[in-house]
Image: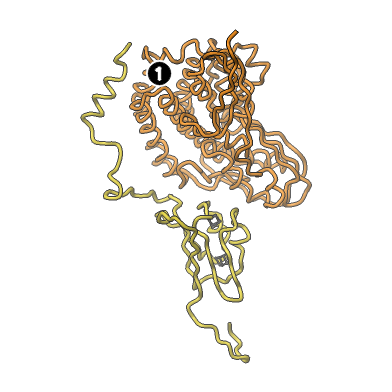
Amino acid sequence: MIFSMSKTVLSSLFSKPSTRLYPITQRVPFKNTRGKIEIDIAACTFCGLCSKKCPTSAITVTRADKKWEINRLQCLACDYCVLVCPKKCLTMENAYTTPAVATSKDSFKVARVPDNTADSKDS
Amino acid sequence: MSKRTIIPFGPQHPVLPEPIHLDLVVEDEKVIEAIPSIGFIHRGLEKLVEKKDFIDYVYVAERICGICSAIHGQTYCQAVEEVMNIAVPERALYLRTIWGELSRVHSHLLWLGLMADGFGFEALFMHCWRLRETVLDMIEETTGGRVIFGSCKVGGVRKDIDKPTLERIVAKLNGMEKEIKEVTDVFIVDRSVKHRTVGVGVLSKQDAYELGAVGPTMRASGINQDMRKLGYAAYKQLKFEPIVETAGDSYSRCVVRIKEIFQSIDLIRQAAVQLPEGPIDVKVTGTPSGEFFARTEQPRGEVIYYLKANGTRFLQRLRVRTPTFANIPALVKLLQGCELADVPILALTIDPCISCTER
Ligand code: SF4
Ligand code: SF4
């Protein structure tokens, strides 16, 4: 048989394309899609559990500076940090990170400037 | 006697996006011998097991291969569960089966596309991948990842599939069957395609057996062996027969994979009907101690996970024998005596996944 493909070819000739005209039409991610990690920094206690459990060590938590950092290119969106965080302040967004050509670290800091006076009790 | 020449093939080759290197000893246009060498992308993932908690290692195991991801994770979990004597809930076993079969459908469609691309049939290649995209959407909808599922964990699964979603997926697969048949029929009946595959690269039953071939490569040579018949996960409750062809040529390997697509769809249908209600995971406490060999059937064949645990949170040893590793001796054998122009196609017919071979 020679024309075994003709039916498929003809039907794709008269149907709309299977591909999208990216970036004009963008794909809508599913509810479950693992896109990128976001943090609600105000709720974070800097316990460091997420960074310890992360399979690729993408997260760095500095307790002293109250800083939470993520290396976007190192993160493989496995969702594990979201699962282990005791404060549930991490979420997995559905949208992917934007394409990048260089490694970037997103760092989040508690907005409130710590009180440096010696007698300060709260931190 | 004509002069012998050595032609290097790979690790970078237009047809084969997999880093394997073959030294082809040719005489005129005939390949006399093929000498393989691998080791270009060794990642040391087996060693990493000593530094990662055994619960967390699932995420690494899943990433050993980008295509058989679900089954890698599942095999690792099975091995740990066996060592720790964890009874996994029935529902979790069924869900693992459904995801495993979805990954088989997408892997075989991917392979068919690559095969079509290999013999220069671009339109066919795109149609195979168009169909695969629908399967990837199902996977993404249920697990969150397109090829890396991330759904398996020690003691069960991490995500559930609700009834309406599962029904929708089954209905979609039922509808797709016709489309898949239209496309795969081209591989089976088209004269120009058959010209490239029928009678090329014959692996006899004896050779397949002696060289320890696995998966579709072995079944195409007439050996009836499918690890799913061991009855892990939910396979013991599902009805299916291994697909066996006898000719042992490229065409048979192609036919086995095509039939397995329909078999997988049927298995998903059965599993969806029988899927029991109940919990999807159990709490895991304690640490593993002991050793175990887990064997499962991946799209490319049998994978073996050996693990040894000494009662700490870190495993002592993990060994992964991937299907492609077992199929390389068979590949070397079937390359002997073939035409130089057939080498890329023959290398493709064992469905090589070198990245997972090198871990
Ligand atoms: S685990 Fe949660 S609370 Fe702890 S450092 Fe990470 S984000 Fe913050
Ligand atoms: S999603 Fe996974 S890889 Fe990414 S930061 Fe969280 S734990 Fe690490």
Left/right placement of residue B182 relative to residue A51 reads left
Instruction: Check the rendered structure and report the hue given to chain A.
Output: yellow
Disc 1: which chain?
A: B
Residue B142's spot in the image, x, y percent?
Answer: 45, 44
Q: Residue at x 48, y 61 (%)?
A: A104
Residue B160 appears in view: yes
Left/right placement of residue A74 relative to residue A52 reads left
Chain in orange colour = B
Q: Nearer the viewer, residue B284 or B146?
A: B146
Q: Nearer the viewer, residue B289 or A37?
A: A37
Residue B127's spot in the image, x, y percent?
Answer: 35, 29
The image shows residue A116, relative to residue A96, as above or below, that is below
How crowded pointer 1 is (Cα within 10 Å; few <14, some 14-19, many 20+) is rated as many
Q: According to the image, label 1 marks what residue?
A: B187
Residue A107's spot in the image, x, y percent?
Answer: 50, 68
Q: Amino acid at mark 1?
A: Phe
